[in-house]
Amino acid sequence: MKLGIAIGELVLAVLCVLGAVASWSRGLATTSFAAAGDLPGFEATRYVAPWLLLATFLLLVAGLVGIDAVGRARRR
């Protein structure tokens, strides 16, 4: 029974990491500006705080759930 819970927690941890990667990607918005006259073209990166915060939270949850899963598996 404990091993099943540990496996479920590891699956949850992997899902949290995948969600964090997706959230982090949405948290970086890059905009390209074309050259205009004497001004050179450039790219600007804007950070979207709510997505980055969600990514950080999901990584924190993944770490805690992963640690708990390892602890459950070792106590088996």
Image (cartoon, grey):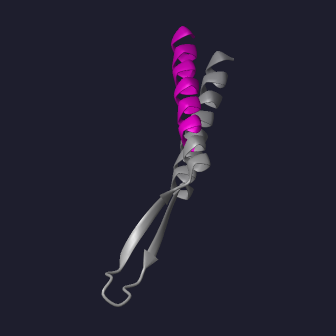
Considering the image in quadrants, where does the C terminus appear? top right
Q: Residue at x 55, y 17 (%)?
A: 73
Residue 37 relative to residue 10: left or right: left
Q: Residue at x 58, y 25 (%)?
A: 65
| Image quadrant where residue 27 sits | bottom right
| Image quadrant where residue 3 sits | top right
Residue 49 relative to residue 31: left or right: right
Considering the image in quadrants, where does the N terminus appear? top right
Look at the image and give the residue range highlighted in magenta: 55-76
Q: Residue at x 57, y 51 (%)?
A: 23
Q: Residue 10 at x, y = what percent?
A: 57, 31
Q: Nearer the viewer, residue 71 or 22?
A: 22
Magenta segment, prevailing SS (helix, strand or loop)? helix
Taking 3 as reference, is 76 above or below it? Answer: above
Taking 58 as reference, is 30 above or below it? Answer: below
Which residue in the rendered view is the most extreme toward the top? 75
Q: Residue at x 41, y 84 (%)?
A: 34
Q: Nearer the viewer, residue 49 or 5?
A: 49
Which residue in the rendered view is the most extreme toward the front? 38
Q: Residue 11 at x, y = what percent?
A: 60, 36
Q: Is residue 57 magenta?
A: yes
Q: How many marks?
A: 0
Q: Nearer the viewer, residue 68 or 75?
A: 68
Q: Residue 38 at x, y = what percent?
A: 30, 87
Q: Is residue 44 magenta?
A: no
Taking 54 as reference, is 38 above or below it? Answer: below
Which residue in the rendered view is the most extreme toward the right? 1
Taking 15 as reference, is 41 above or below it? Answer: below
| Image quadrant where residue 44 sits | bottom left
